Amino acid sequence: MASLSEFVAKMPKAELHVHIEGTLTPSLTHKFAKRNSVPIPEAIRSLDTSSNEYAFHDLPSFLAVYYSAMSVLLTAADFCDLVWAYLQKAHSQNVLHTEMFFDPQAHTSRGVSLPTVIEGIRQGIVKAEQELGISTNLIMCFLRDLEPGFAMATLIDALPYKDWIIAVGLDSDERDNPPAKFANVFQRAKAEGFLVTCHCDVDQKDSIEHIRQVLVDIGVNRIDHGTNIVEDETLVDLVKLRGIGLTCCPISDSVVTKDFKGKEILQLLRSGVKVTVNSDDPAYFKGYMNENILRLADDAEVSRLELVQLQKNAFEISWISEQKREIFLEALSKYAETV
């Protein structure tokens, strides 16, 4: 029998929770800074690019580095190269389909035009589809610690690119920024034909109320993170009834909360909730898809068949055509026969 690491490495996968800005490694940061003739951000200036690792110890220190590093992303070529680098890595880990978040407001607020961001990302997606055969969807996120008016303006400005964006989401600092704050934005997004997802980060103030808001008031198609839902059986029953999936991220959870939420993920999985495992911000949290799956497998009592089920969930809740879904699920089913 193959080792666990080999089994995970070869398993067909879908990744549904990855921030493209969170794939910006220190080496890429240095590359783009040099190409654009801009200073290396102070928060990462002293890092050894050979280690390709950032240093932080909690959520505030992570966000300080995260937004600082983005300052080197200035041209469409930068965004294209960023996407290409991530999709190469995902492909190397046998990810067949990925759905990437991007944060346009983090770029337009510092003077980078929306067309530069979206067209650059699109170029990277097309390149990867043509050269690697990897399937990709794009999710545009709003920064919840900014005003809803800015989010609405961003949504309207992005309408010419509707064919390239499958859904809209909500991320960034959740403290005192409930999903209901953006209800009108999501209502307009739905009217324009976008699918909707929202981050409900782990162990936040009012976590359960925020999960209730996204399910009942906003009516999301998916929830990002969201493992605190185990605290309310009524909400668990609701996501099962609607077939709504959760995109969980064990390694980032372990950094932000000191608990990788493996127990909760498995509790939800075994109760029939369509939970999945993803990488979140892999350049920062030092773990891509395989590493996150192995973290769950190493630190929780999970069977190989349950690891397969996590990937089945991911393909089932992904926003792809039924034809693609059948192809991916068939590949996974054949692989599962090796268990």
Image (cartoon, helix red, strand yellow):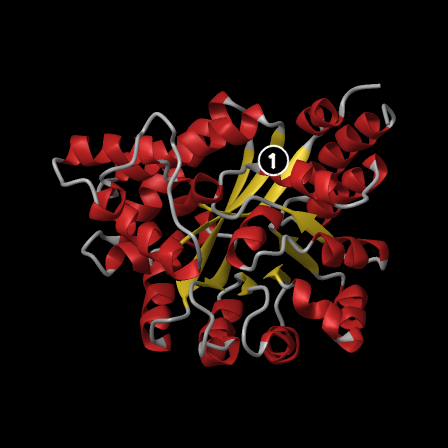
On screen, residue 81 above or below 204: above
Query: Is label 1 in a helix, a strand or a loop?
Result: helix
**x and y, in percent, of residue 252 in the image:** 54, 50
The three-letter amino acid code for the residue at tag 1 is Glu
Residue 103 visible, this orientation: no
In the visual, does 217 lie left or right of 138?
right
**x and y, in percent, of residue 113 in the image:** 23, 53
In the visual, does 323 lie left or right of 131?
right
On screen, residue 38 above or below 318: above
Looking at the rendered structure, the number of numbered marks drawn on it comes to: 1
Q: Furthest residue to the top?
A: 1
* x 52%, y 52%: residue: 255
* x 29%, y 36%: residue: 47
In front of the other: 314 or 325: 314
* x 87%, y 26%: residue: 337
Quadrant where the image shows the C terminus: top right
Q: Quadrant of residue 58?
A: bottom left
On screen, residue 179 above or below 79: below
**x and y, in percent, of residue 49 in the image:** 31, 29
In front of the other: 68 or 20: 68
* x 76%, y 46%: residue: 300
Q: Quadrant of residue 72?
A: top left
**x and y, in percent, of residue 75 in the image:** 23, 40
Quadrant where the image shows the N terminus: top right
Q: On the image, numbered disc 1 is attached to which residue?
A: 291
In the visual, does 134 lie left or right of 41?
right
Residue 154 visible, this orientation: yes
In front of the other: 312 or 57: 57
Label 1: how many Cα within 10 Å (few below 14, some 14–19, many 20+): many
In the visual, does 176 lie left or right of 97?
left
